[in-house]
Amino acid sequence: QVQMVQSETEVKKPGSSVKVSCKASGDTITSYTITWVRQAPGQGLEWMGRIIPILGTPNTAQKFQGRVTITADKSTSTAYLDLSSLTSEDTAVYYCEGWSGASSIWGQGTMVIVS
Amino acid sequence: QSALTQPASVSGSPGQSITISCTGTSSDVGGYNLVSWYQQHPGKAPKLIIYEVTKRPSGVSDRFSASKSGNTASLTISGLQADDEADYYCSSYAGSSSVLFGGGTTLTV
């Protein structure tokens, strides 16, 4: 069974950066479009961006342009979300979703705490 | 770009049907047949239940159905069950390779 396995909880200082990973277990990541979504405590979902690993070109929400880098490593079937200049407002659970055209697989979420 | 508009909460009794609306603009919901719906139980990752306005992924109950008219999409859940109690989010492609989410609707059964 294919899973998207995310990295563990991160605690970061304001002004620093965080890199969250999302590994496709049981399949190659090139079979999916990977989307990153975050959810602040008690809040709704927020679309951050996505990448089609087989093509390599990411799209990032305008709000995060200049602060977010989305990449994928085909050799390890892993996608990454890099978020810089962290503030307390970036405290959230970060999810990756793999979409293959008819099925959607979500990671378990990665908590990022900025404090 | 503003978030899509959903009611904050809806409720229904077991066995009944409910409908959740998702209102956008002609630049997002009304402009593309790329509306999705997600179910999220507390402390869990979201689950895709509808994509491309009306399509259900494999394994999703046919009690979930959806439609779109103009700038408003709708999710209907029939035969409500206790396990349907969750938060529901709509999303839509909004052009320029961007996606918008709705603010979410809490369903109480």
Image (cartoon, rainbow, N blue to C red):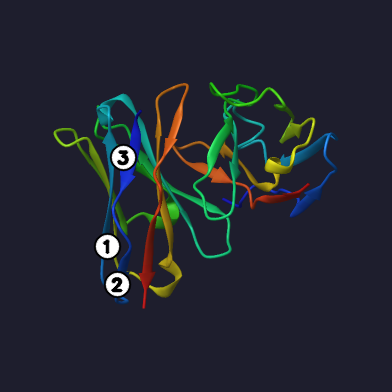
- Label 2: state its secondary structure: strand
Q: Which tag is nearer the camera, tag 3 or tag 1? A: 1
Q: Residue A73 at what x, y percent from top left?
A: 18, 38
- Which residue is rendered at x = 14% and y = 33% of the image? A75
Q: Name the residue under label 2.
A: A12
Nearer-the-camera pick, B20 or A2? A2
**Callout 3, which amino acid?**
Pro
Q: Residue A21: give x, y in percent of width and height.
A: 27, 49
Q: Can residue A90 be seen in this view?
A: yes
Left or right, A80 with respect to B87, comes to left
What element does badge 1 sit on?
strand
Chain ID at mark 2: A
* Category of crowding for the residue at label 2, using alpha-carbon neighbours closer than 10 angstroms: few (below 14), some (14–19), many (at least 20): some
Q: Mark 1 lies on which chain?
A: A
Which of pointers 3 and 2 indicates the residue nearer the eye? 2
Question: Residue at 79% across / 30% down in the picture?
Answer: B78
For badge 2, the amino acid type reads Lys
For residue A18, which numbered disc appears in the image? 1
Q: Can residue B23 be seen in this view?
A: no
* Chain of the residue that carries numbered disc 3 in the rendered image: A
Residue at image mark 3: A58
The count of marks equals 3
Q: Mark 3 vs mark 2: same chain?
A: yes
Q: Earlier in the sequence, mark 3 or mark 2?
A: 2
Residue B74 place in picture, x, y as percent: 74, 34
Q: Where A11 falls versus A76 (above or below)?
A: below
Which image quadrant is residue B14 in? Answer: top right
